[in-house]
Image: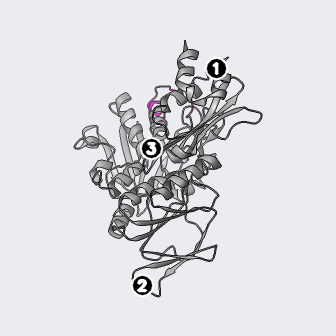
């Protein structure tokens, strides 16, 4: 049996290790389009802050991990897949045959339609090479503009702030982390960042980037409010999309990602998908969604690997959960944080101390939550949502005081 895995991120590496644990003799080929060992993109901000060095991002730290497990690691990008011939064509020439194929190609940064994105000093923060370029330009006191205040943007924000740059964040929508937080929470996070010396412009768009006529090696960032900002560095963090463009002629069922069943199998029987390119089951809604977070990618990779190797395993679905540490303020969203039609909610706001809790109910169950300023509740909220516990009389207690989540979990779990 020959297994080919396209993509060496968390899902691809997890799948390779899982397959080897079930099938000790099969041939496993792990493909990566980048020149480094397999690494975690989520660890890149820690390199920016010097908390770790580049090897600290590597997904497997033991020496010769892949060789020791007879996993053939190739640094080669894929041009196309031929499901009729069961082959993968590599960029630059050559091809590979497979019996089972896993597509774990992740996502790529969205490139907004703005003039000037090709200028020197403009970078995404998606690869280790991007990280090196940012470190070179993000010296203490440098003028830096960060485009985007979404989940990934806020992770980058913290790393840039810790480097001591003069940071301005430009977000097109009306609040920070708009796909993770409501207006109340997003604006509390904005106020927190501004108190920490970060300028945050919401409901504002970058319209153009151009070389500065006044200062060498600097950029002029034009905004739709008529203002312009100087920048030694512009970091683009305006979202990501699944890497599925090379599959257009393959015949896989796709939407925003590759549609998979509860065994991570695509619409082609011997092709599986996992991670940020896979549109899998959302536990909270029962619908199919792309959850571009590392824990989901690892779960996908494990389930896909088991099924590819012949050991049947079902994916129960991922709970949408995001946790951010933004310059010391912990924020989190869970499940249907924006509520359900006809559902009740509970809310507690302490703006002065940057503490916020909002619970979303569907009948007697909690289906979503938002919080700021708490670190002791992540497991409890996930448990309440994932176990679908009926709250009974505790629903009204939580509506009166949503901070009683731990007490509710203990009482209702017995």
Alpha carbons under labels 1 and 2: distance apart: 62 Å
| Earlier-in-chain disc, 3 versus 1 | 3
Choose top left, top right, bottom left or bottom right for residue 227: bottom right
Magenta residue check for 183: no
Please determine whether, in this image, residue 347 is positioned above or below residue 180.
Answer: above
Name the secondary structure under disc 2: loop
Q: Earlier in the sequence, mark 1 or mark 2?
A: 2
Q: Residue at x 24, y 39 (%)?
A: 68
Locate the N terminus and report the quarter of the image it occupies. top left
Point out the residue furthest to the top here.
Answer: 414
* Horizontal and vertical percent position of residue 61: 27, 43
Q: Which residue occupies 36% across, 67% down?
A: 138
Label for residue 394? 1
Q: Which mark is residue 215?
A: 2
Residue 248 drawn at (x, y percent): 60, 55
Mark nearest the camera among 3 and 1 is 1
Q: Which residues are magenta?
A: 304-317
Which residue matches tag 3?
Answer: 98
- In depth, the one of 345 and 264 nearer the eye is 345
């Amino acid at each position: 049996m020959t297994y080919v895995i396209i993509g060496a991120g968390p899902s691809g590496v997890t799948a390779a290790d899982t397959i080897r644990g079930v099938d000790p003799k099969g041939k496993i080929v792990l493909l990566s389009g980048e020149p480094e060992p397999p690494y975690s993109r989520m660890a890149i901000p820690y390199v920016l802050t010097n908390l770790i060095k580049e090897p600290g991002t590597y997904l497997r730290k033991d020496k010769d991990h892949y060789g020791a497990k007879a996993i053939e690691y190739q640094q080669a990008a894929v041009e196309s897949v031929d499901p009729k011939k069961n082959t993968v064509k590599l960029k630059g020439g050559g091809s590979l045959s497979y019996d089972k194929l896993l597509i774990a190609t992740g996502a790529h940064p969205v490139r907004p339609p703005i003039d000037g994105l090709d200028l020197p000093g403009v970078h995404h923060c998606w690869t280790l090479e991007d990280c090196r370029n940012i470190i070179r330009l993000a010296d203490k006191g440098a003028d830096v503009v960060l485009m985007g205040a979404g989940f990934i943007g806020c992770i980058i924000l913290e790393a840039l702030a810790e480097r001591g740059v003069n940071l301005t964040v430009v977000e097109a929508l009306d609040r920070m982390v708009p796909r993770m937080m409501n207006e109340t929470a997003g604006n509390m996070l904005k106020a927190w960042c501004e108190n920490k010396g970060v300028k945050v412009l919401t409901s504002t768009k970058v319209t153009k980037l151009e070389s500065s006529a006044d200062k060498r090696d600097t950029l002029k960032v034009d905004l739709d409010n008529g203002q312009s900002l100087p920048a030694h560095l512009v970091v683009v963090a305006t979202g990501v999309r699944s890497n599925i463009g090379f599959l257009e002629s393959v015949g896989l069922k796709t939407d925003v990602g590759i549609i998979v069943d509860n065994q991570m199998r695509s619409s082609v029987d011997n092709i599986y998908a996992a991670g940020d390119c896979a549109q899998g089951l959302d536990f909270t809604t029962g619908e199919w969604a792309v959850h571009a977070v590392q824990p989901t990618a690892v779960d996908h990779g494990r389930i896909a690997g088991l099924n590819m190797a012949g050991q049947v395993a079902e994916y129960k679905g991922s709970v949408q959960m995001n946790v951010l540490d933004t310059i010391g303020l912990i924020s989190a969203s869970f499940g249907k944080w924006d509520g359900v039609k006809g559902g009740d909610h509970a809310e507690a706001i302490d703006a002065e101390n940057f503490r916020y809790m909002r619970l979303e109910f569907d009948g007697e169950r909690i289906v979503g939550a938002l919080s700021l300023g708490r670190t002791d509740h992540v497991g409890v909220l996930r448990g309440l949502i994932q176990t679908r516990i009926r709250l009974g009389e505790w629903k009204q207690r939580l509506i009166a005081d949503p901070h009683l989540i731990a007490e509710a979990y203990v009482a209702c779990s017995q």
